[in-house]
Image (cartoon, grey):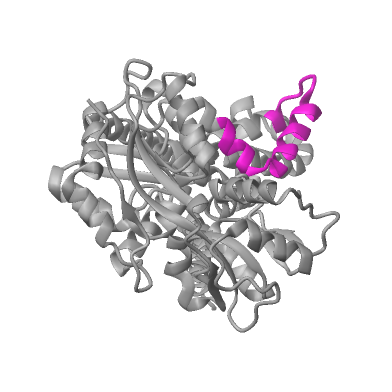
Amino acid sequence: MTALRRPREPLPWPSFVTVWRVAFVLAALLILAGMAVSIDLQPRSFIILATTTSARDSGLLDYLVPYFQSDTGIGVRYTAVGTGQALDLGSRGDADVVFVHAPSAELAFMASGQGLCRSPVMMNQFVVVGPNQSDPAGILGLTNATIAFERIRTTHALFISRGDNSGTNIIEKTIWSWVGYTPSTTNDTWYKESGQGMAATLDIASQLVAYTLSDDGTFLVHSANLDLRIDVQHDPALRNFYSVIPVNPSVHPSIFVAGALRFAKWLTSERGQSLIGNYTAGGVRPFQPDGQDLCP
Amino acid sequence: MTDFSEILQIVGLSILVSGTSTLIGSVVGVPLGVLVALRKFRGRNFVRTVAFTFYGFPPVLAGLLVFLILSRGGPLGFLGFLFTPIGMILAQSVIVMPIVMGITISAMMTVEKRLHDTSLALGANERQWRTTALHDARVGVFTAVMVGFGRAISEVGTVLIVGGNIRGQTRVLTTAIVLEISQAHYLEATIFGIILFVIAFAVFAFLQRLQAKGVV
């Protein structure tokens, strides 16, 4: 007689409903744990810094932050966004301190009472970069970006714009206004908008054998992978000023104002300034310290 | 450049955030889905359509909404959850929940029709009937949870806006990929992409094994 196989019993493991109960308890525990952790963090030992992508993409922040942390014991959590969004995060009270380069927008931010104080930190310059092998617009060696843009326009040499209303894009539009011409992607086949960040735009310009406007920091950091060179530099009109602004605690009580002030003062201190001046990227020092402590 | 321990941290946070939000989204979404599928009420089809519509809800928009809620000026700003993993989990739960709910509704409705009369004829009460229906639809419900996780681990919009892509704190695989691409570091971006793919594969393989073993 063949032994009948016993029909498989249901596994001792729980049914679907029990699994769901376990999931429920687990979810509740995780939420509670998350809340406990975040409430524990309320007396903060770190600042939230809102800054522009160029400060990150040039590598400067990742270089500075560890020094600040070891000097002061205060951590820095930075989020790199567009200039407008960085200032907005400050005016919402979501960031303790902002580090940006848009003087006119910064003055508006201060005028509306959102900033506690505003200290200049450093400057770099914008440069017009173009193809490594050729120079279709004939602008190599110029020190006047307006003349360079004029030549790009008349020769219809390919130009890539950020097209994203970033600080760099605003400077580019300003230069076009000096030329007295507003290029548009619909009428000018030589004018393209990338709608992306600086590093990505540089890469596009390199691929398409085109000119573009860049801050020198980002360009120098990435130049090894780009088939581009600096054609126009040292134009006084193309200097780019960075400032640090702690957010006003009387408008936003949740601000970690001591940490924010410490950061602003550290950046403009001798220590911070010499670190900035010594920062090297792509074999060059892209940032020129011009710090001045204007904070109380 | 990103070193190994940092990659581990990014991977760990990705799994934690997406896993937890899938859990929360499922714990809320499955019962809601069961309720909508098994209860007859006015506007049931409307609820179902809304749930399906949310499949196509752009994560950036969900991210913006959660950002506005968690921002200091927003209704939950006092919690200080913006730019933290908790905020990211909340935002992803908002995305996962309707997906889990929608697929659960579909799965339940396929078994509901033939099961309902039989169960009640055999003397089951309402609660027993719901349990039986859920048991019968478990494969579909399980699929709902897996699709929800797939959406969570692969989305970039909410975690970028609500998390802020803060190095060592809120950077996950997808935001790391976006960052590397913006720097034109295509090799690093591809490596992160492969890691993401491997994790998704491992998680789904594990879940399917659970299912095959009859645990679920």
Q: Position of residue A117 (x, y in %)?
A: 32, 27
> Left of B180 or right of it: where is B167?
left
> Left of B67 or right of it: where is A243?
left
Q: Is residue B62 part of the magenta span, yes or no? A: yes
Q: Position of residue A219 (x, y in %)?
A: 48, 66
Task: Give the vertical position of A273 relative to A296 (above or below).
Answer: below
Q: Is residue B199 part of the magenta span, yes or no? A: no
Q: Nearer the viewer, residue B103 or A137?
A: A137
Q: Position of residue A104 (x, y in %)?
A: 51, 34
By secondary structure, the bulk of the magenta-drawn segment is best described as helix
Q: Residue furthest bottom?
A: A133
Task: Give the vertical position of A176 relative to A189 (above or below).
Answer: above
Segment tinted magenta in the rendering: B36-65
> Left of B176 or right of it: where is A180?
right
Indicate the quadrant where residue B54 lies. top right
Q: In which quadrant of the rendered image does the N terminus of chain B lie?
A: bottom left
Question: Which residue is at 67% across, 58% downward?
Answer: A194
Kindly tell me whether residue B84 is visible in this rendering.
no
Indicate the quadrant where residue A147 lies. bottom right
- The image shows a total of numbered marks equal to 0
